[in-house]
Image (cartoon, helix red, strand yellow):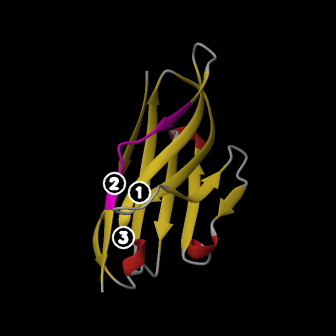
Amino acid sequence: QVQLVESGGGLVQAGGSLNLSCAASGSIFRLNTMGWYRQAPGKQRELVATITRGGTINYVDFVKGRFTISRDNAKNTVYLQMNSLKPEDTAGYYCNALIHTQSMHLVQYWGQGTQVTVSS
């Protein structure tokens, strides 16, 4: 069994910053690409950023220059530093990871989500 546990969400004023963390634990052989997605009320879940095990990063346009994704492979953790937050960034933020389990199955896992609310 594998778990992804997010933390770091909260309420912040526009222009402020938050740093999200997502730690993976359990029956992990290899942690591959990790990423962050978000879902606002009434909207579909959308990609925010991804990072491969080797550090290749992909951002969607609306966060470029404001958000930074990083990871610590030794800690099985991915981070999302969010700066210059806007009210439209308000959403539930979900961690995603593609994992080879100890039984050598390749499985995609999701965290439970952490709420980010940006007030104007």
Residue at position x 57%, y 67% in the image = 68
- Nearer-N-terminus badge (2/1): 1
Magenta-colored span: 108-115
- Of the two numbered discs 3 and 2 in the rendering, the one whose residue sits closer to the viewer: 3
Q: Callout 3: helix, strand or loop?
A: loop
Query: In the drawing, what numbered circle is on residue 90?
Result: 3
Most frequent secondary structure within the magenta stretch: strand
Q: Which residue is mark 1?
A: 93
Judge by depth and name the residue closer to the eye, 43 or 68.
43
Task: Say above or below: 81 vs 114.
Answer: below
Residue at position x 56%, y 73% in the image = 63
Task: Work out how far the residue at label 3 is from the one at label 1, CA to CA, in angstroms.
Answer: 9 Å
Residue farthest top in this picture:
103
Task: Name the spot of residue 13 as percent of width and height, x first.
Answer: 30, 82
Mark 1: amino acid? Tyr
Residue at position x 46%, y 36% in the image = 24
Counting the numbered discs, the total is 3
Q: Which residue is mark 2?
A: 114
Residue 95 among magenta residues: no
Judge by depth and name the residue closer to the eye, 53 or 58.
58
Crowding at dot 3, Cα within 10 Å, few <14 / some 14-19 / many 20+, comes out as: many
Task: Work out how far the residue at label 3 is from the one at label 2, CA to CA, in angstroms.
Answer: 11 Å
Mark 3: amino acid? Thr
Mark 2: amino acid? Thr
